[in-house]
Amino acid sequence: MDGIIEQYEKYVMPTYGRQPAAFVRGQGCYLYDEEGNAYLDFVAGLSINNLGHCHPAVVAAVQEQVAELIHTCNLYYTRPGGELARLLSESSLGGKVFFANSGAGANECAIKLARKYGRDLAGEGKHRIITLENGFHGRTMATLTATAQPAKQEPFKPLLPGFTYVAPNDLVGLAAAMDDSVCAIMLEPVQGEGGVHPLNSEFLQVARELAGRHQALLVFDEVQTGMGRTGKLYAYQHSGVKPDVITLAKSLAGALPIGACVAAPPYSDVLGPGTHATTFGGGPVPCAAGIAVMRELTAPGFLESVDARGEYMRSMLRKLQDRGLVTGVRGLGLMNAVDLPEPRAAEVAGQALAAKILLNNTSANTLRFLPPLIVEERMIDQVVEFLETALSV
């Protein structure tokens, strides 16, 4: 393990605050280090390994595809890209898909689509995009500007013009920010990197109404919440509020790099030839993996089991809240978080690593739980028992 870490420290830019662990193998809900130690994974690659590590269906799909065709440029057609696009379209907005390489890439596409839509409709004046404070949409310059977190933005100013920020669930603030110069409202149904904060249904409904009234697109960033994470295939299905555009990534290809921007039929052809592109987007191998992922997620009973285990986890975490060990429990499906009464979240995550459990803190006071969707109740019990011991000290 030391050799792996030394190489990173010597040759890899220090853009991540990495934990002192190096893994060589993954299976199901566990990661393994060079010594063969098993770590229970409640981070899941930040919701990338939704089906767990090395899911057999994903492995088989990748092995078969990589032996046939690894890549060709987007001047031509391949079967996996078209099939995955069909599955995404028919399960969501019924429109068309742009394939990117990441969540940030999918959100860049959504931002460009919204800007071009506004320009086509009303000229350069219709260009503003409203996003929410505490949200997260990526780290490219456009998506960083959309990410209304000053600490993340400060080192890279000046940012892109044309973005307006509103507090989450602030109906008055959203209404005040809206006018005909807005081309899109962009938000996460559950703010993930911000600490797992679901937006309330009333706010989403008002956003839908205001977007329609002002001929603006309603864009849902489902990079973290999509692909079954919240107990439904897409988080917007909880509220019944249907957006015009959704963005996906993370677990879409079972941990291979991919992103997708799905636009409803009225907006599917806003971006024509030459207006947007990416070299690796929609490659045969990640798309083959994505097809396998979609089949697993839509198998009878799978999403219902995610919802049930998520509710079980929250019920166990609420027992810690009843004892005063945590001050808040929230989430949807298997996307959950707790707040601590003291700023100990990083410390507790470090203690968990020592106990061979992988946890993630999104702030000094907040622990986030993103286990694979195949997690078992006994594994949830193990994590809650660890928390009970660690937080009782």
Image (tube, rainbow, N blue to C red):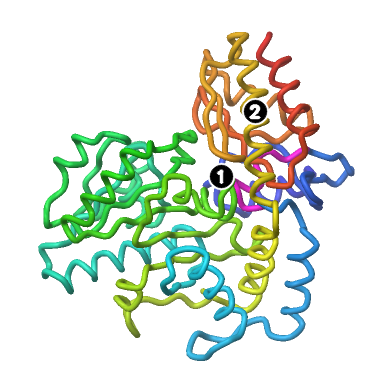
Q: Quadrant of the N terminus?
A: top right
Front-lying residue, 227 or 8: 227
Q: Is residue 272 above or below residue 177?
A: below
Residue 349 is tagged as: 2
What's the CA distance linking mark 1 and mark 2? 23 Å
- Residue 149 coordinates in the image, percent (x, y): 35, 39
- Residue found 70% across the figure and 37% down from its top: 20
- Circle 1 packing at 10 Å, graded few (<14), some (14-19), many (20+), is many
Inspect the image, locate mark 2, and give the three-letter code of the amino acid beneath it: Ala
Precedes in sequence: disc 1 or disc 2: 1
Inspect the image, locate mark 1, and give the three-letter code of the amino acid beneath it: Thr
Residue that label 1 marks: 230
Q: Is residue 249 above or below residue 385?
A: below
Please state if 220 lies on the left or on the right of 266 as rendered: right
Residue 144 is tagged as: none
Q: Is residue 269 above or below residue 155?
A: below
Front-lying residue, 383 or 7: 383
Identity of the residue furthest to the right in this view: 36
- Residue 361 coordinates in the image, percent (x, y): 56, 31
Q: Quadrant of the C terminus?
A: top right
- Residue 342 coordinates in the image, percent (x, y): 52, 14
Badge 2 element = helix
Please state if 159 lies on the left or on the right of 343 as rendered: left
What span is in magenta?
A: 40-49
- Circle 2 packing at 10 Å, graded few (<14), some (14-19), many (20+), is many
Please state if 150 lies on the left or on the right of 2 as rendered: left
Please state if 270 lies on the left or on the right of 227 as rendered: left
- Residue found 17% across the figure and 70% down from its top: 119
